[in-house]
Amino acid sequence: MIWTDVAAALVTTKTPRQVEVSDCLDKSRSPECRTCPARFGPDCISRVALGLLNAALIDNEKRTPMTHVRSQKADSELAFWQSRLRQQGTLTNDHYAYFYTAHFGLAKTFYRSKKILDIGCGPRGSLEWADEAAARIGIDPLAAAYRQLGTSRHAMHAGSAEGLPFPDASFDVVCSLNSLDHVDDLNQTIGEICRVLAPRGYFLLVTEIHRHPTVLEPMVYSWDIVAAFQPELAVVEQKQVEYTVFSPEGFGDIYQSLREGTPYDHSDVRERSGILSVRFRKGG
Ligand SMILES: C[S@@+](CC[C@H](N)C(=O)[O-])C[C@H]1O[C@@H](n2cnc3c(N)ncnc32)[C@H](O)[C@@H]1O
């Protein structure tokens, strides 16, 4: 089987679709992901096909090569934050303290003398609250551009999740809040998160679960994405939440919806996005 054929077969349905666990393209390996040798890794046919499908869909729809799609992604992200800045006057960051602490069952004092990495940190200064940490580093491909938005007071490194410029086991806490579906290579990103996290360290994940790739959010995965981090990281707690708060333009508000915390109703089969929040811990 050739991967591009798999993607092409899926694309001919003309309906963008997510490759689910239940949709496994190679049932001969194992009936379950947990016991499958591919385990969502680089050998997982469904996952490889999904990556190609996403690329093909974006490419087909926009009729542009992927390199252009990537720069279009950066332009769109920046335009989003510029418009937020115009609307709000300043890019505030008060809400983050709650999400890094109470939301994940961690006290602010827990962060005392810890090293924290925030992947896809955005321009707001997401770690400004963590003033007792030994190190607090935000990394984002748009860090340089974000400095033009008046956010230069926050320590941000330009870089990507796929190649974190830090030695192994450098951080006590690694976070990805609303950024995992924004990356370009999910496998590499997951490998890098596991690599830079110290033994017994926490990985804090908040991510949207959606079904259709967009230029800004090219990665699509289901609730089972937690399995892709196992067994290196164990799940301490997870929440699966409905979008209940929306902006006037109709965009789901991930943070306000998480605060409301309405459990995602899996018995309701209507197609809609949801929010996954997980606290992982690295073994060792
Ligand atoms: C929706 S914003 C989230 C910002 C912030 N974490 C928050 O929740 O407010 C997604 C961020 O992911 C960043 N991003 C996109 N591709 C990335 C990559 N390959 N590696 C790391 N971050 C990336 C974007 O530049 C953007 O700042």
Image (spheres, rainbow, N blue to C red):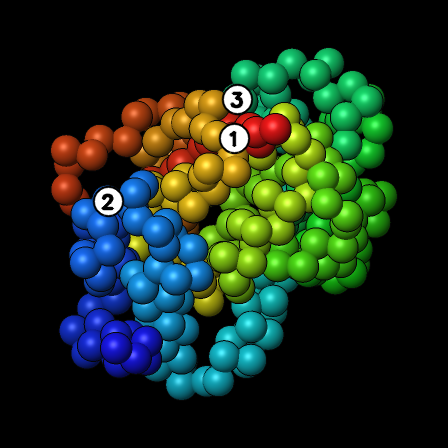
Q: Which residue is mark 1?
A: 280
Residue 71, position as x, y percentages in the image:
59, 74
Residue 245, position as x, y percentages in the image:
38, 34
Q: Amino acid at mark 2?
A: Glu
Q: Which residue is mark 3?
A: 103
The numbered disc on residue 136 is: none
Q: Is residue 83 left or right of residue 230?
A: right
Q: Amino acid at mark 1?
A: Phe
Query: 152 above or below 71?
Result: above
Q: Which residue is mark 2?
A: 32
**Dots 2 and 1: beta carbons under 8 Å?**
no
Answer with the quarter of the image where residue 57 lies. Answer: bottom left
Label 2 – label 1 distance at C-alpha: 22 Å
Q: Residues within 10 Å of mark 1 (few under 14, many from 20)?
A: many
Looking at the rendered structure, the secondary structure element under dot 3 is helix
Q: Residues within 10 Å of mark 3 (few under 14, many from 20)?
A: some
Residue 234, position as x, y percentages in the image:
48, 30
